[in-house]
Image (cartoon, rainbow, N blue to C red):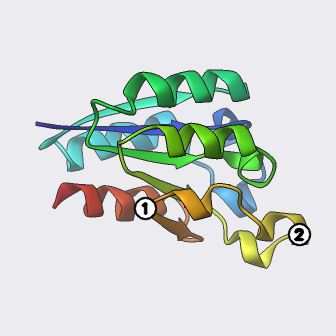
């Protein structure tokens, strides 16, 4: 069974409460339960942290043994060279995911330090962005 992990960065623990007009009203934990049912042929795990170093540690931990990583680094996408370096250092492919269309938001969100070092990017399809990434890894 393929092992896939979804890693969410800062403030994504507030999904369902934070700016529901952008991010929706569903918590990620509720959504993740539906993903586990829908993708029961995959071994899915979920990890969230608001701390950059914890995200790097998790990438190092799973980045040589898993079949795929789906990473929504939140605001660290636009600031963290360290996360980009961690992705470059591992062998597991990473798909960068964003719930909102970052290019339709503030200008500073238009740049990603992660995009040049990931397998692909999925932006702006709401929570379905995660499913699109899982569809890729399901093949």
Number of the front mark, 2 or 1: 1
Q: Is residue 110 above or below residue 12?
A: below
| Local secondary structure at mark 1 | loop
Q: Name the residue rendered at 43%, 21% in the picture.
A: 61
Where residue 103 appears, as percent x and y from the top left, is 74, 76
Q: CA gap, disc 2 to disc 1?
A: 25 Å
Q: Name the image quarter holding the N terminus.
A: top left
Mark on residue 119?
Answer: 1
- Looking at the image, which is closer to me, 70 or 21? 70
Q: Where residue 15 sits: x, y (%)? A: 65, 42
Residue pushed farthest right? Answer: 107
Q: Quadrant of residue 4?
A: top left
Kindly indicate whether the residue at mark 1 contacts the one at mark 2 (C-beta within 8 angstroms). Answer: no
Give the numbered dot on residue 106.
2
Point out residue 19 in the picture as x, y percentages from the top left corner: 78, 53
Residue at 48% in and 33% down: 29
- Seen from the viewer's position, the closer of residues 129 and 21 is 129
């Amino acid at each position: 069974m393929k092992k896939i992990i979804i890693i969410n960065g800062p403030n994504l623990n507030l999904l369902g409460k934070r700016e529901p007009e952008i991010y929706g009203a569903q918590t990620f934990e509720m959504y993740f339960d539906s993903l586990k049912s829908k993708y029961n042929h995959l071994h899915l795990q979920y990890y969230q942290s608001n701390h950059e170093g914890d995200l790097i540690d998790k990438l190092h931990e799973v980045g040589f043994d898993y079949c795929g990583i789906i990473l929504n680094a939140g605001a660290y996408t636009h600031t963290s060279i360290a996360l980009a370096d961690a992705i470059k250092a591992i062998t597991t492919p990473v798909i960068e995911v964003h719930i909102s269309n970052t290019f339709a938001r503030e200008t500073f969100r238009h740049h990603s330090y992660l995009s040049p070092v990931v397998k692909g990017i999925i932006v702006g399809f709401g929570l379905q962005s995660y499913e699109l990434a899982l569809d890729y890894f399901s093949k």
